[in-house]
Image (spheres, rainbow, N blue to C red):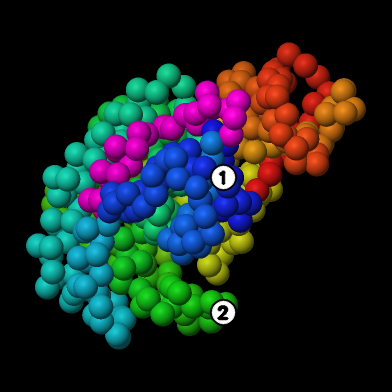
Amino acid sequence: MVRYAIDDITDEMVLGQSIFSSNGELLLAAGYHVTERYRRRLKELGFQTVLIEVEGTEGVLPETIITDHVQKEVAISFTKTVSELKDVFSFRKVTKDSVQDMIRENRNQLEKFVTNSGMAQALEKLIDEILNVPAVVLNLSTLDQIGGDFLKHVLNVSVITLCLGRKFRLNYEEMKQLGMGVINYDLGLLAIPRELLEKEEELTPEEKSVFEQHTVYGHLMLSQNPAFPPTSAAVALQHHEYQDGTGFPRKLRGDNRPPLKDFSRPSMIHRFAEIVAVADHYDMLTSGRRHFSTKLPLKEAMAELIRLAGGQLNSNVVKTLISIVPVYPVGARVRLIDSPVAQLIGYSGVVAKDNPEDLERPQVILYETRNHQRVKPVLINLAQHSGFVLELMG
């Protein structure tokens, strides 16, 4: 199977993997032609890519860090509870006092949200799956089978964060606290006026000040719950703090240490928040986010992360993330822009398998000429042959 951008799909193409909504409803089953009507609806629901059947690539199955079943379980639980909380915060005048009043009045409902058994069980399964994969190679395109921008954003950042936690060898209890923090880290956005979050124009300084309060609101929602660890609540408050002290809301500083131990210094960013900050930035750069970043190609996104390392983001966490992100994810469409075999230049294909020793040199199946004519698939292992240069398509 090959991952195609929605805009590159034509009517005769056949869906290779079923697509589900955020509440687990089947939207389009594998085997159907992805006609213009379906493409338009998928785009409306926030899907950017889908897997397409291509002869000769049947064995290409993008490896997922978490299974479809667990994705759906997290999606259903998260969507249900967020929907309920949106009703709680559907007021017009937003001030710190009004949010505090709402939190006090709806404390029982908030406690149910952050500690409900469905979410807790889904989070534990998420952690178990990440801890049990043989090697962490982060291919987030496999999470694109569930729609909904906010849900996809939270799920992406949660998976990235927990993969980083595994790479730093956090124990199971630490992974649970980190997981509880990241799955709830943007909860405070529910208390920000929807018209501000959806505003197309650049935010005014006053609007930015209101937006930045989401970290405080999220912390208020979580920290008053006795069942919620303070280390997890710190993630909501501090995930926009920067290493150089220029972040918000408290302008805390970091010292770019590996996030291995909790030094518990009140003037420093908590290590869990440092991990989530890197995961959040990566998702923002690769997915795009209104007011903050357009969607960047992977290499440009990684270059921007490197630029931010040390000043804004923990350099050790950035280095670790880069080590697990494949430049060419399995299932991605690629084109040969240089080749020792001249007639192959311009051919396109699919990444068939990662090379864990060198993520820039995967195995590739070529199946289409530069003139878009299908040919008998050819497998090339770039780790064994030099001179091949790829570029990602779509």
Residue 270 image point, x, y percent = 39, 46
Residue at which label 1 appears: 13
Q: Is residue 67 magenta?
A: yes
Q: Are marks 1 and 2 in contact (CB under 8 Å)?
A: no
Q: Quadrant of the N terminus?
A: top right
Q: Quadrant of residue 165?
A: top left
Identify the mark nearer the N-term, 1 or 2. 1
Residue 185 image point, x, y percent = 34, 54
Q: Is residue 8 above or below residue 392?
A: below
Assess disc 2: are there few (<14), some (14-19) or many (≥20) residues with their C-alpha within 10 Å of its C-alpha. Answer: few
Callout 1: helix, strand or loop?
loop
Circle on res. 201? 2
Report the mark closest to the observer, 1 or 2.
Answer: 1
- Residue at coordinates 48% horizontally, 43% vertically from top-left? 15
The amino acid pointed to by label 2 is Glu
Assess disc 1: are there few (<14), some (14-19) or many (≥20) residues with their C-alpha within 10 Å of its C-alpha. Answer: some
For the magenta stretch, what is the residue range?
54-78
